[in-house]
Amino acid sequence: MDASIISQILPLRSRFHRRLVATVVLLGSGLLVGCDRGAPTAKNGGAASSGTDSSTVSSAAQTAVAHNGSARNIVTTTGMVRDIVRQVVGERWTVTGLIESGVDPHLFKPTRGDVKRLNDAEVVFYSGLALEGRMSETFEQLRRAGKPVFAVTDQIEAASLRTPPEFADHHDPHVWMDAALWSQCVEHVGESLAKLDPPHADEYHERATAYRAELTRLDEYARRSIASIPESQRVLVTAHDAFGYFSQAYGIEVKSVQGVSTEAEAGVSDVNRLVDLLVERKLPAIFVESSVNAKNIKAVIEGAASRGVTVRVGGELFSDAMGQDGTYEGTYLGMIDHNVTTIVRALGGDAPEKGMDGKLEAK
Ligand code: ZN
C-alpha cells in the first residue's frame, strides 16, 4: 500500500469519525434512548426526551389539522421519506422535502429558512433512528410547540433493527435498504395521517395498502435477482456502511471500505482486506455511491490492480439520497430498482437492463 492510497483513505475516515463523534454527543445528551417498544420516551433517535411519543398525536394538533381544510402542507426530510408520504397522501396535501438529492442526511443541519418551513408545516415526517442527527433539537422544539412530528421508522420492531458496533449502541438508520421494512414505515405514515385527518382515513389506508403491494413486488424482485448472482460473487463492496439491511434482507455479503475503526492504520488494513477478498473471490466489480466520495473505492481498485487483478466500478448506487426529483430514480421504487439491477448485472446475475418495470434509464 503506497502513501498516496493512505492519503486518499484519510479524509473519508475522518468524515466517518465525525459522524461517530456526533453520535456520541447525542448519546451523551440523552436524546438517544433505548429501543424497547412502548418506552415512554421517543426511542428512535432525534426524538424528544420530554416523554412525547411521536406516534401519539396531541388532541390540540389533531384539532388544528382537522379544522384547517385549505393549506395542507407536509414537510419531510429525505427524498425517501418524502416519496412514501406522497404515495400515501396523493394529491390531498403538498409534500416537500428539505434534504436535496445527493446531500448526506447524517450531516444535514437545517438553515433558518428550513426551520421556518418546518414551523409553517402542518405535519412533519422524518426518517428517524438518528439519521438526521443534527435535527434532533429542531424536532423536539416543534413537538413542544404542539406540531405533529413523526419518525417514519418509529413503529418498526426493535428486533428487526440492526445494532452494529460501528453505530455506537444505537440502531443502524438505513432501514429503506430493505423494502419490506420500509413498507412498515408506509403503514405508520398511513396510520398517522388517518389519526390526524379522520374524514379521509380510509383513503390514506387504501393508498398505503396499494403502495405496500408495490413494495412487496420490489422486495420479491430484489430477492430473486440477487439470488441469481453466482454464490461466490454474491458480495457487495461499496464505500460507506449503508447496506447492512440490504445484506440482511437479500442475502448478499456487504463489505464497505469504511470499517468499524476510526484509526488511520485500520483504514489501510480495511483496504488491504478488501483487496484480498477481491483477489480471492475473483469479484468482477465494486460500487461507488452517489452521496459519498469515490476515492477509497479507487484505492481498492488500484490495490487489486497492483496484484494483477482487474476490478471495475460496477456502477453508482443510491445509498442515503435518491436520484433527481421527477425521475424514476428519484422515487423510492426507482432507487432500489436501480441499485438491485446495477448490482446484479455487474456481479454476473440475471436482471433486465432496464430493471423491474423497464423504467430505468439505459446505461
Ligand atoms: Zn448513511
Image (cartoon, rainbow, N blue to C red):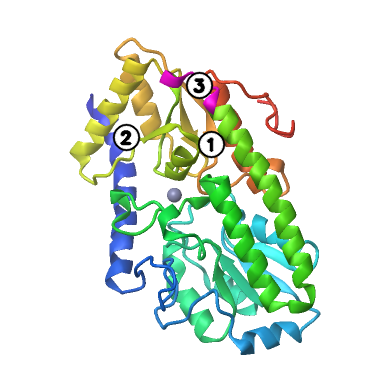
- Please state which of the two labelled residues, at mark 2 or mark 1, is closer to the viewer: 1
Q: Secondary structure at mark 1?
A: strand
How would you rate the neighbour count of disc 3 (Cα within 10 Å): few for under 14, some for 14-19, many for 20 or more?
A: many
- How far across and down, in percent of the image, does residue 124 sit? 60, 71
- How far across and down, in percent of the image, does residue 157 sit? 46, 60
Q: Name the N-terminal-most of marks 2 and 3.
A: 2
Residue 8 is marked as 2
Query: Where 34 falls versus 161 (above or below)?
Result: below
Q: Please state which amino acid type lies under the numbered disc 2.
A: Gln
Mark 1: C-beta under 8 Å from nearest atom of ligand 1:
no
- Please state which of the two labelled residues, at mark 2 or mark 3, is closer to the viewer: 3
Query: Where 196 falls versus 317 (above or below)?
Result: below
How would you rate the neighbour count of disc 1 (Cα within 10 Å): few for under 14, some for 14-19, many for 20 or more?
A: many
Membership of 229 in magenta stretch:
yes
Q: Nearer the viewer, residue 3 or 52?
A: 52
Residue 317 is marked as 1
- How far across and down, in percent of the image, does residue 190 sit? 67, 65
Magenta segment: 227-232
Q: Quadrant of the C terminus?
A: top right
Residue drawn at x 38%, y 22% as measured from the top left: 301
Q: Which residue is mark 3?
A: 347
